[in-house]
Amino acid sequence: MTALEFTIVVLALSALAGFLGALTGLGGGVVVVPALTLALGVDMKYAIGASLVSVIATSSGAAAAYVREGFSNIRIGMFLEIATTIGAVLGAFLASRFSTHALAIVFGLILLQAAYMSFKGLPESAERVASDALATRLRLGGDYPVAGSPQPYGVRNVPAGFAMMFGAGALSGLLGIGSGAVKVIAMDRVMRIPFKVSTTTSNFMIGVTAAASAGLYLKHGYIDPQVAMPVMLGVLAGALVGAKLLMHMRVKTLRMVFGAVILALAIEMIVNGITGKV
Amino acid sequence: MDDHRLETIIGRLLQAGVLLAAAVVTIGAVTYLAQHHADGVDYRHFVAGGPDTSTLNGIVRSAAHFESLGIIQFGLLLLIATPVARVALAIAGFALERDRLYTVVSVVVLLILLASLLHAT
């Protein structure tokens, strides 16, 4: 393959990945890594390096739009970023110790979970709670717009949420993904933060978390300019278009189809990892 | 300065950082493809690149010589720097709000990010 052909093919695949990732809320990373490794035979380490860069781009690119909606909570985000960044540094360190086969198998397992989430949709907890003692001391509670007027919300179970965020950061650093789904579950389900606040705050955290792995990724040569260039530009463009369309589309059917594709990718990734093809 | 105003400023900063990074990467990409479009490429087996693409000093030096891959990598560095700048701005914002707790929290996050980026020097 020539450099021009490679760039065009990767640009197109990445744009599709970013588009689907934005529409389904799973992010571009979980799609772009298997697309590169399974369809083009790109080594996992180049794929996760390029994916990490694209994750920073989509997170930062979408931030202004999220802020305008008035949902994200900068205190919750910043406090939990202590956990995600430390986790990310550990994950990036482990990525250099893992074999490509082992990385492929772990990635396949994460894809299985992503497929499950696409079929089920992200679980959303309904009723609001008051902050517990630790969350009150940390002043994590806030308010968010419901039907135009601000409604206050409380935060609970900070230690459990913090521990889960450490895990989300480690996965992000190990696999070059945003691991937004784990972050949302930690905030929405464990810490009882409203779903909208959880998703938008998670988007903010993804970029900072990924930046914490970037130093080690650069040092180990995972961020290769020829691979990362079309992935970053493609995923960013696809994600911006996807986010615009999201407001005018019914995504339930799409999510089912996407879930089936992810499930197939998960199985292929795990099988290839075990047989040593990836 | 309140939290929402701080978040609006930070959101704008992030967007500007991404657009700038994407523009630099695109310039590098056009230069690279103009010179190397017919070269064969193979990414089937991982080979760690040299200092020109994997260390901060090497990337800046290479970009300053207008080498296409150096320009792309410099654009990616700008991208990696946007969330770091976001945390630095949050420190200033919390300090202006006289919020000691969250100024310290933000400083801790910034130190972790900088310690990680030091690996690439």
Image (cartoon, coloured by chain):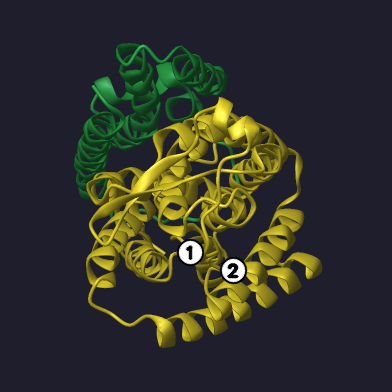
Front residue (pair A141, A79): A141
Residue at the far front: name it. Answer: A130
Mark 2 lies on residue: A114
The type of residue carrying mark 1 is Leu
Q: Of the residues under marks 1 and 2, which one precedes in the sequence? A: 1
**Count of marks, rendered view:** 2
In this rendering, the answer to whether A46 lies above or below A247 is: above
The residue sitting at 28% across, 79% down in the picture is: A249
> The N terminus of chain B appears in which quarter of the rendering?
top left
Q: Disc 1: which chain?
A: A
Q: Which residue is mark 1?
A: A26
Asked if one can make out residue A156 in the rendered structure from this viewpoint, the answer is yes
- Residue B36 visible in the snapshot: no
**Chain drawn green in the picture:** B
Q: Position of residue A250 (x, y in %)?
A: 33, 83
Residue type, mark 2 in image: Ala
Q: Colour of chain A?
A: yellow
| In the image: residue B10, left or right of residue A221 | left
Residue closest to the eye, A122 or A85:
A122
Residue A150 on image: x %, y %:
30, 49
The answer to whether mark 1 and mark 2 are in CB contact below 8 A is: yes
Residue drawn at 44 percent across, 15 percent down = B103
Q: Position of residue A109 (x, y in %)?
A: 71, 65
